């Protein structure tokens, strides 16, 4: 399924990335599959278990494709500690030390709450004021997504949750609006992804959402194993 084939969220935003599905429906499946995988030993057995996981994930979740516009993105960069490639939107810049201090104190807790890990990558769009954050997940992606959803719900942000497959990743997305800021949190894991779980986040001023929506779609679509 292509991203544009999906109906928008019931959120009052123009467009939308994914249609909400049952909340955290993968938890029971994930536990069961993890238990099954412990029965296998050796490289061949691990390959078989991974293939089985991927097949069952294909049945459980829809594959979502993203339109990647190369003109909107910089060249791919490798994040060796995660084993992934990512592409920064064109003309987005790395935050300087002062900006990072402000981000760490005032913005990042919105994404991760207290005790959040230091972002691996942090980029700013000087025109729209949007932020792109990439962070290693210290724990299971499913648990982090559930905690984020519950935290934002408790804060009264009315988050939306959805799960989908993307190029071998299982992605759990939490989307909400905090004041005048539209926030996307996407937690990546999956049967075909050998690296550690990680999160990418986008914080976008509501007034500039339409202007950067296609840029964000391209940036999400550009995430690849590598």
Image: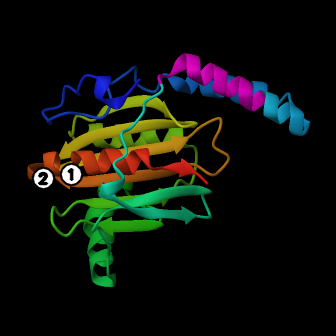
Quarter of the rendering containing residue 33: top right
Q: From the image, give the main secondary structure of the stretch colored magenta.
A: helix
Q: Which residue lies furthest to the left in this view?
A: 207
> Image height check: is 77 above or below 171?
below
Q: Residue 208 carries which label?
A: 2
Q: Is residue 52 inside the magenta stretch? A: yes
The residue located at (20%, 39%) in the rendering is 156
Residue 59 vs residue 25: left or right?
right
Return the residue nearer the eye: 165 or 67. Answer: 67
Residue 22 vs residue 157: left or right?
right
Q: Residue furthest front?
A: 71
Name the residue that disc number 1 marks: 212
Q: Position of residue 52 (x, y in %)?
A: 72, 23
Q: Where is residue 221 in the image (x, y as percent from the top left)?
A: 42, 44
> Image height check: is 62 above or below 73?
above
The residue located at (31%, 56%) in the rendering is 71
Evaluate if marks 1 and 2 touch, with contact meaning CB atoms under 8 Å apart: yes
The color scheme shown is rainbow
Q: Where is residue 65 in the image (x, y as percent from the top left)?
A: 42, 33
Return the residue nearer the eye: 31 or 170. Answer: 170
Magenta span of residues? 49-62
Q: How crowded is mark 1: few (under 14 residues within 10 Å), some or many (20 or more)?
A: some
Quarter of the rendering containing residue 152: top left
The residue located at (19%, 25%) in the rendering is 10
Q: How crowded is mark 2: few (under 14 residues within 10 Å), some or many (20 or more)?
A: some
């Amino acid at each position: 399924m292509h991203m544009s084939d999906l109906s928008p969220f019931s959120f009052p935003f123009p467009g939308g990335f994914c249609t909400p599905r049952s909340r955290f429906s993968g938890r029971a499946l994930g536990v069961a599959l993890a238990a099954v995988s412990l029965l296998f030993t050796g490289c061949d057995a691990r390959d078989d278990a991974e293939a089985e996981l991927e097949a069952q994930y294909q049945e459980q979740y829809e594959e979502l494709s993203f339109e990647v516009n190369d003109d909107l993105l910089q060249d791919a960069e490798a994040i060796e500690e995660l084993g992934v490639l990512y592409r920064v939107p064109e003309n987005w810049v790395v935050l300087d030390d002062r900006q990072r201090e402000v981000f760490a104190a005032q913005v990042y807790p919105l994404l991760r709450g207290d005790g959040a890990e230091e972002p691996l990558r942090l980029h700013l769009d000087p025109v729209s004021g949007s932020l792109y954050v990439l962070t290693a997940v210290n724990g299971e992606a499913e648990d982090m997504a559930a905690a984020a959803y519950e935290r934002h719900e408790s804060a009264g942000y009315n988050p939306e949750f959805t799960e989908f497959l993307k190029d071998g990743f299982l992605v759990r997305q939490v989307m909400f609006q905090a004041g005048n800021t539209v926030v996307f949190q996407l937690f990546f894991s999956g049967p075909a992804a050998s690296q550690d779980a990680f999160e990418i986040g986008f914080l976008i001023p509501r007034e500039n959402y339409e202007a950067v929506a296609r840029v964000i779609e391209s940036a999400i679509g550009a995430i690849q194993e590598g």
